[in-house]
């Protein structure tokens, strides 16, 4: 079993963010824990999970989970352990913002069972952080990493965003260098996307921001790919790289289409061909939970065609690739000749970094 807990609370909304969040000055930790605990207990008798074994991974995502009082993290971990055995080597990840990290909080997270932190750095450029509406300053990143490690959590992932508008003057190579200087075990890097219902979307619509051009976007992605290899990282998924043995096991479960359970507002669950998702808004989720009503907002059953497409897309976005029998021979030949893929000795098709830049188009072409 893989468990995801969506913690929606944030200090402010980032300029690019279209996630399900709730901006709160005071985070209602107790009420959130009670609601998620009720949802978790309600799943225990579900036929899909009734015979499930150990919990292998737990992921606190958001939102900003580090804004919860640490006692809330501990109480949720206790609730999981009370209902299900937690694997001895379970990966327990908490997403955190640098400005939330203190020695006391990091120690409390570690005592609760957290053994991996995903730190939302995004950039080391103060002007860029301000433009992104981030709540932390660049000077807070290194002390946060140090506090996390001093608390006994040595698995530290850093998040960065690339593909910013050229007008921002962001030095991508400098950000990569500063990230490597902190010796993370894992690095996630995401291309900036313009979502319509965000501050960035409005700026773009008004012509105040010009999105990055394709050439610059591709160059920054390929620069990261090369820099990661030079530092000994495995670029194992389009947006993720890790030192050997440090891949994110929770996220890897998604890419393998393993069964997962999502708790909290907007969280999704998936098992077999079934997909379920919760009420998106925190207030609506809390009201339904307190009333003893279902917090589920929708569900669907995937067709065989949809499952095949999902397997194709997820396989190609990872370094593990796909068995060659899943693709037409002429497609494989065309991709390898163009430098977008390679065929391994074990007859698996793996996209190159150049291929990953064309992932959506390649999948569309393979299914046309």
Image (cartoon, rainbow, N blue to C red):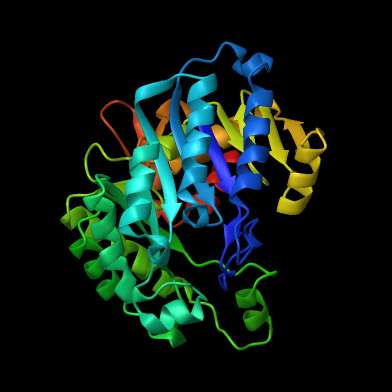
**Residue at (50% x, 57% y) in the render:** 67
Q: Is residue 188 left or right of residue 65?
A: left
Where does residue 326 sit, x and y in percent of width and height?
Answer: 49, 28
Q: Is residue 150 left or right of residue 260?
A: left
The furthest residue to the top: 51
Query: Residue 201 or 70: which is nearer the viewer?
Result: 70
Query: Residue 179 or 169: which is nearer the viewer?
Result: 179
Where does residue 76 sit, x and y in percent of width and height?
Answer: 53, 36
**100, above or below 336, in the image:** below
| Image quarter of the C terminus | top right
**Residue at (44% x, 71% y) in the render:** 163
Q: Is residue 178 left or right of residue 3?
A: left
**Residue at (22% x, 68% y) in the render:** 177
Residue 329 visible in this rendered orientation of the protein: no
**Residue at (59% x, 50% y) in the render:** 29
Residue 101 visible in this rendered orientation of the protein: yes
**278, above or below 133, in the image:** above
Where does residue 118 sit, x and y in percent of width and height?
Answer: 38, 52
Q: Quadrant of residue 270?
A: top right
Query: Residue 21 or 289: which is nearer the viewer?
Result: 289
Disc count in the image? 0
Q: Is residue 347 left or right of residue 305?
A: left
Where does residue 51 sit, x and y in percent of width and height?
Answer: 57, 11
């Amino acid at each position: 079993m893989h468990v995801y807990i969506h913690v929606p609370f944030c200090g402010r909304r980032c300029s690019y963010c279209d996630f399900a969040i709730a901006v709160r000055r005071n985070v209602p930790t107790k009420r959130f824990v009670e609601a998620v605990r009720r949802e978790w207990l309600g799943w225990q008798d579900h036929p899909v999970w009734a015979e499930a074994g150990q919990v292998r991974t737990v992921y606190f995502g958001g939102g900003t989970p580090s804004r919860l009082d640490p006692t809330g993290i501990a109480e949720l971990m206790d609730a999981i352990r009370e209902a299900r055995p937690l694997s001895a080597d379970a990966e327990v990840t908490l997403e955190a913002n640098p400005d939330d990290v203190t020695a006391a909080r990091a120690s409390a997270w570690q005592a609760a069972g957290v053994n991996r932190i995903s730190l939302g750095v995004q950039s080391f450029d103060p002007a860029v952080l301000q433009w992104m509406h981030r709540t932390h300053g660049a000077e807070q990143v290194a002390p946060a990493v140090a506090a996390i490690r001093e608390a006994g959590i040595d698995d530290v992932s850093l998040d960065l965003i690339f593909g910013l508008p050229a007008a921002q003057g962001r030095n991508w190579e400098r950000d990569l260098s500063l990230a490597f200087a902190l010796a993370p075990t894992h690095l996630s890097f995401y291309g900036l996307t313009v979502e319509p219902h965000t501050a960035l979307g409005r700026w773009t619509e008004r012509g105040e921001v010009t999105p990055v051009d394709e050439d610059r976007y591709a160059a920054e992605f390929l620069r990261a790919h090369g820099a990661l290899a030079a530092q000994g990282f495995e670029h194992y998924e389009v947006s993720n790289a890790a030192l050997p043995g440090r891949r994110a096991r929770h996220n890897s479960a998604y890419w393998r289409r393993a069964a997962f359970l999502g708790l909290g507002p907007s969280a999704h669950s998936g098992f077999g061909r079934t997909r379920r998702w919760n009420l998106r808004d925190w207030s609506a989720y809390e009201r339904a939970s307190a009333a003893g009503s279902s917090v589920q907002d929708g569900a669907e059953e995937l067709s065989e065609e949809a499952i095949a497409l999902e397997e194709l897309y997820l396989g190609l976005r990872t370094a593990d690739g796909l068995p060659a029998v899943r693709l037409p021979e002429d497609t494989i030949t065309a991709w390898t000749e163009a430098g977008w893929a390679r065929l391994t000795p074990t007859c698996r098709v793996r996209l190159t970094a150049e291929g990953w830049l064309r992932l959506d188009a390649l999948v569309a072409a393979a299914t046309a």
